[in-house]
Amino acid sequence: MPDPVYVHDAFARIADRYVLTNHVLSMGMDVLWRKMVARQVKRWAPKKLLDVASGTGDLALEIQDQLPNCDVLATDFCAEMLVHASNRGVARTQVADALNLPFETGSFDAVTVAFGLRNMADYPAGLREMRRVLRPGGNLLILDFSLPPGILRGPYRLYLHHVLPRMAGWLTREKDAYEYLGGSIEQFPSGTAMLELLTECGFIQPQARPMTCGVVSIYQAENPN
Ligand SMILES: C[S@@+](CC[C@H](N)C(=O)[O-])C[C@H]1O[C@@H](n2cnc3c(N)ncnc32)[C@H](O)[C@@H]1O
């Protein structure tokens, strides 16, 4: 599991170039993925939403745009990332560790986490904490990388471990942070493994939706009543 000190420092170092690097490395697909997440969240019509590990606030901004009547709170343990979220227009931000959220039990209708759970030191602890702050019947949505199935997996791994760190190193001057990315994706549960983890952590009706040939997946689940 990722070392939280390394993760915090790595994101603090790349914060200024994080948004641009994401757009370049995903060839703009990250914008589309977040739009799809926000569209799914809109179906739940939450009044209070927590975006965990919000970073520079891309998902929180998209949700704010698509759900103008929803109270969106963006949290992250890296203040350097959250500064960008505020500057880019996220209305409410708060520095908070996802493994120890400073919120009362059952205080949110929905919790979202994009490319964040994978970076946490303890995935089950992160999921349990997200469930704790969800109201009974509230919804969780996770957007994160997964490994494409079949013949695409080999070429994708080549891109992930060799091409991507070089390009990101050139863009951010922080090649090691993107070498870490490939390793973190390899270790992160995806597909049925994630559905099992969600069930183990007390969620019900877990669902997985792979996108872009399985390079990323949207997972959703519900906090029982
Ligand atoms: C890859 S970025 C994702 C940012 C944003 N959600 C997005 O979609 O672009 C991962 C974020 O997770 C945050 N993070 C990692 N572990 C965390 C923790 N335990 N508590 C809060 N934030 C955490 C990092 O600081 C970083 O901003």
Image (cartoon, rainbow, N blue to C red):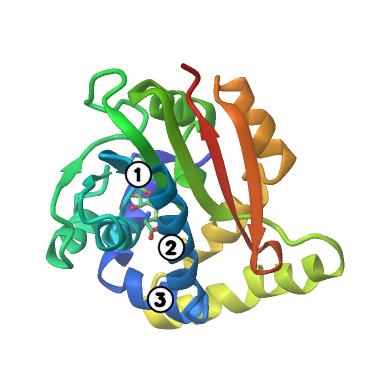
Q: Quick check: is the Cβ at mark 2 less than 8 Å away from ligand 1?
A: yes
Tell me what residue is drawn at x 40 percent, y 70 percent.
174
Looking at the rendering, which quadrant does residue 161 occupy?
A: bottom right
Looking at the rendering, which quadrant does residue 63 occupy?
A: bottom left
Answer yes or no: do the residues labelled 3 and 2 have beta carbons within 8 Å? no
> Would you say 165 lies left or right of 101 here?
right
Answer yes or no: do the residues labelled 2 and 1 have beta carbons within 8 Å? no
Tell me what residue is drawn at x 18 percent, y 58 percent.
90
Up-down relation of residue 45 to residue 55 (above or below): above
Q: Secondary structure at mark 1?
A: loop
Cα distance between the residues tagged 1 and 3: 31 Å
Residue bearing mark 2: 34
Residue bearing mark 1: 45
* N-terminal label among 1 and 3: 3
At which x and y percent is residue 81?
25, 57
Up-down relation of residue 12 to residue 20 (above or below): above
Kindly identify which numbered label has been placed on residue 21. Answer: 3
Q: Secondary structure at mark 2?
A: helix
* Residue type, mark 1 in image: Ala
* Residue type, mark 2 in image: Arg
At which x and y percent is residue 82?
21, 54
Q: Nearer the viewer, residue 188 or 177?
A: 188
Q: Residues within 10 Å of mark 1 (few under 14, many from 20)?
A: some
* N-terminal label among 3 and 2: 3
